[in-house]
Image (cartoon, rainbow, N blue to C red):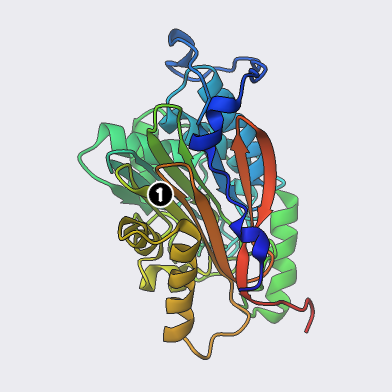
Amino acid sequence: MNDRREFLKLSVAGTAALVTGCTPRSTKEEIPGVMDRDPMTTGGAIVISTWAHGMTANAKAWSVLDQGGSVLDAVEHGVRVVESDFGNRSVGLGGTPDRDGFVTLDACIQDHDGRAGAVAFLQRFENPISVARAVMERTPHVMLVGIGAERWAIENGFDRKEIEIPEVRKAWQEWLVESEYRPVVNIENHDTIGMVAMDANGRMAGSCTTSGMGYKIHGRVGDSPIIGAGLFVDGDVGAACATGVGELVIRTAGSHTVVELMRQGVEPVDACRETVLRILKKNPELEEMQVGFLALRKDGAHGAWAIYEGFDRAVRTEQGEELVPSGFERTWVRGR
Ligand code: ASP
């Protein structure tokens, strides 16, 4: 194994009793329903998300929990921060476009009891994760896609966001020169935000949102909105989410595989690693394609593993926040 630091696990459930300090209360923001609830203790709660942009997302999710929001509120509002950051080139409307120059968005959300909602191939909405949650809560379905999803979103009170981001257009025009579809390890055409969380009462939820692989074929949908691939939550066991080349994750039902391994008693980090190894075994020719999984078990233990080095997860607990490097199978030499 390449990274011993991976085994530094935060056993939040075990250490929470030692914590006497209080998290400073953050400024309240409009989150439907949250203002009416009693603040709850965050002791034992944990929020984990993919990549460095997970730090700001976690901070938001934590403040939602701190204000008495549910864990579902937390994972929704946490990733919204990244979706609404139009400077982010891999999530939301600032994301990398497809090969025809359109930014198309995928997202899903799942609660402790396995209820789920998803949208895919959605254009011109700032917060697909909230549309996904509404699909879960207001329809008998799990997933809506494309024009149907957009029409339904408008009918249900979501506004279109007509925004032209010059950097997105410029990147696409530059890409057109060679028009080569080539996923690159750990750079901005290759991210997602996936978040898994547990509140102080042990309730879990997860969310996942992305603009998908840069310069994909128009209409391509990745793993991120697919329950069991980009995200899977089973409150009886734990939760997992994925980042990286979605096709590889879908073929292995990646996040579901991680959770099922944990159900069989495999440690979170080993469940992530085993799933990565399955991908490598089935695709021996695989070069320069990243996939990373992160897992949270219901006792607060967590872990992550990736094909290539460089996949970090942001972890927020009552003890503070940190960016933890995941273990990996292969080292990456930039520019080789
Ligand atoms: N998993 C996303 C997708 O395949 C992209 C990524 O995480 O980089 O669309």
The image shows residue 292, relative to residue 48, as above or below, that is: below
Answer with the quarter of the image where residue 235 lies: top left
Please report the residue visible at 50 percent of the width from the left and 61 percent of the height from the top: 269
| Residue 79 horizontal/vertical position (percent) | 55, 40
Residue receiving disc 1? 239
Q: Position of residue 53 (x, y in %)?
A: 67, 47
Q: Please give left or right for residue 225 compared with residue 21 in the image.
A: left
Residue 47 or residue 181, whichever sits in front: 47
Task: Point out the residue furthest to the left here.
Answer: 140
Residue type at the position of mark 1:
Ala
- Counting from the top left corner in percent of width and height, residue 6 is at 62, 59
Question: Does dot 1 land on a helix, a strand or a loop?
Answer: strand
Task: Assign the C terminus to one quadrant of the image.
Answer: bottom right
Give the quadrant of the N terminus: bottom right
Residue drawn where x is 20% and y is 40% of the image:
140
Note whether ligand 1 is within 8 Å of mark 1. Answer: no
Dot 1, how many residues are within 10 Å of its Cα: few (below 14), some (14-19), or many (20+)? many
